[in-house]
């Protein structure tokens, strides 16, 4: 959307997802030339966004530090923006994910209705996608010990595929289902579900007893904001989580469950057993302070304030008089299509062609 470069509108850029870091994991199985091409394009996109914004928002304070570095490299932190606000909160502030101002809708969904989930079941929920940068395998390795102590427990995985049908199944999802089958628990005490409707997702959150998310420690982890953990907090689900990200700090600070080291099946099993030893309601009061902090009115306050009181970024006003040209494309459309086919394959060519068509239609 090159017209954004010279737009007279105030532009808010939402940097909630550090795509540069996420895509390092997402495309790790692709040939190296394809990885390098995709990485270069993501950096180009990110730098273009850094140049056009009047106000930037991000998911958490760790992300804000990351994006301050990007904005510095793109000359957006400079004498003009510093003089306008030495804290730079008028340039970039935290606007993460908020919680609805109501409880999740409660209605029977699985317990006592699904043939493999009895009315007495204790449901341990993996409440989101099984992505390559997460670690469901350690949870499955720990499961026999948990199931031996709590035979009525059921491990439910939600989201074996990406909701976008053009996105291929992540290899980690295949590995998780294969490992569950190898230990003899798939479609017995371990169940895998596709994505649910929003209404059914709420019901499952309300019905579950524990929410789990595990991950290795890597750069994406440090800056992530796991939306599934926000779901658990909304539903007041005690949480088992790998230490290392922002949400695990919340679990520790507010005593919302258990944090474990990465790849430690023994710790995971012990943590789940401790959580199962107490009723779900035992943990509920601990969620109240954090829910208030994460309410939508609180979370969006910096954005609301900017929309009502903010102005153009002072350095963008200067730059709009002599805007920098957009980076030139390497060759025409046909040569670009040939490069995608050669480096990334037919599926990527179809997907990128569709996105290009969507962009062109959006301009008309």
Image (cartoon, helix red, strand yellow):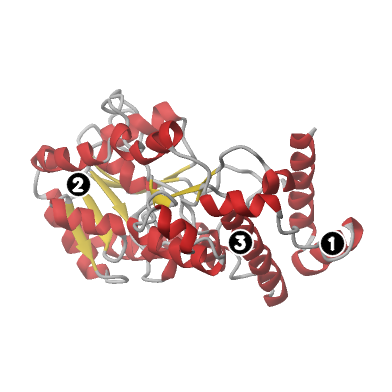
Residues at discs 3 and 2 in contact (Cβ within 8 Å):
no
Label 1 sits on residue: 336
Q: CA distance from mark 1 to mark 3?
A: 21 Å
Q: Is residue 320 left or right of residue 14?
A: right
Picture disc at residue 47: 3
> What residue sits 39% from the left and 58% below the top?
64
Q: Is residue 173 left or right of residue 183?
A: right
Q: Dot 2: what SS?
A: loop
> What residue sits 88% from the left and 64% below the top?
331
Q: Give the quadrant of the C terminus.
A: top right
> Looking at the picture, does residue 83 appear above or below residue 309?
below
Q: CA distance from mark 3 to mark 2?
A: 39 Å
Residues at discs 1 and 2 in contact (Cβ within 8 Å):
no
> Of label 1 and label 2, which has the lower sequence position?
2
Mark 2 packing: few (<14 Cα in 10 Å), some, or many (20+)?
Answer: many
> Looking at the picture, does residue 324 appear above or below residue 32?
above
């Amino acid at each position: 959307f090159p017209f954004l470069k010279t737009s007279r509108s105030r532009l808010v850029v939402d940097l909630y997802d550090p795509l540069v870091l996420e895509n390092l994991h997402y495309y790790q199985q692709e040939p190296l030339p394809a990885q390098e091409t995709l990485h270069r394009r993501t950096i180009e996109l990110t730098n273009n966004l850094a140049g056009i914004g009047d106000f930037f928002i991000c998911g958490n304070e760790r992300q804000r530090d990351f994006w301050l570095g990007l904005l510095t490299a793109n000359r957006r932190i400079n004498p003009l923006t510093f003089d306008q606000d030495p804290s730079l909160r008028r340039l970039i502030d935290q606007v993460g994910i908020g919680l609805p101002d109501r409880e999740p809708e409660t209605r029977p969904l699985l317990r006592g209705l699904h043939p493999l989930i009895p009315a007495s079941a204790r449901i341990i929920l993996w409440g989101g996608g099984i992505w390559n940068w997460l670690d469901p395998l350690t949870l499955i390795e720990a499961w026999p010990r948990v199931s031996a102590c709590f035979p009525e427990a059921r491990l439910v995985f939600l989201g074996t595929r990406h909701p976008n049908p053009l996105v291929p199944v992540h290899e980690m999802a295949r590995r998780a289902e294969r490992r569950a089958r190898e230990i003899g628990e798939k479609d017995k005490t371990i169940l895998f579900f596709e994505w649910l409707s929003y209404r059914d997702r709420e019901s499952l959150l309300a019905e579950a007893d524990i929410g789990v998310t595990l991950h290795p420690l890597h750069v994406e982890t440090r800056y992530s904001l796991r939306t599934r953990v926000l779901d658990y907090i909304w539903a007041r689900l005690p949480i088992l989580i790998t230490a290392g990200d922002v949400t695990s700090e919340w679990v520790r600070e507010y005593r919302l469950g258990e944090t474990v080291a990465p790849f430690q099946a023994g710790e995971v099993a012990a943590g789940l057993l401790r959580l199962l030893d107490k009723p779900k309601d035992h943990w509920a009061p601990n969620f109240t302070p954090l829910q208030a902090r994460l309410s939508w009115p609180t979370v969006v306050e910096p954005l609301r304030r900017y929309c009502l009181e903010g102005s153009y970024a002072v350095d963008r006003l200067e730059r709009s008089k002599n805007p920098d040209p957009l980076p030139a494309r390497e060759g025409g459309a046909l040569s670009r299509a040939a490069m995608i086919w050669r480096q990334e394959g037919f599926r990527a060519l179809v997907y990128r062609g569709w996105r290009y068509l969507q962009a062109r239609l959006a301009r008309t």
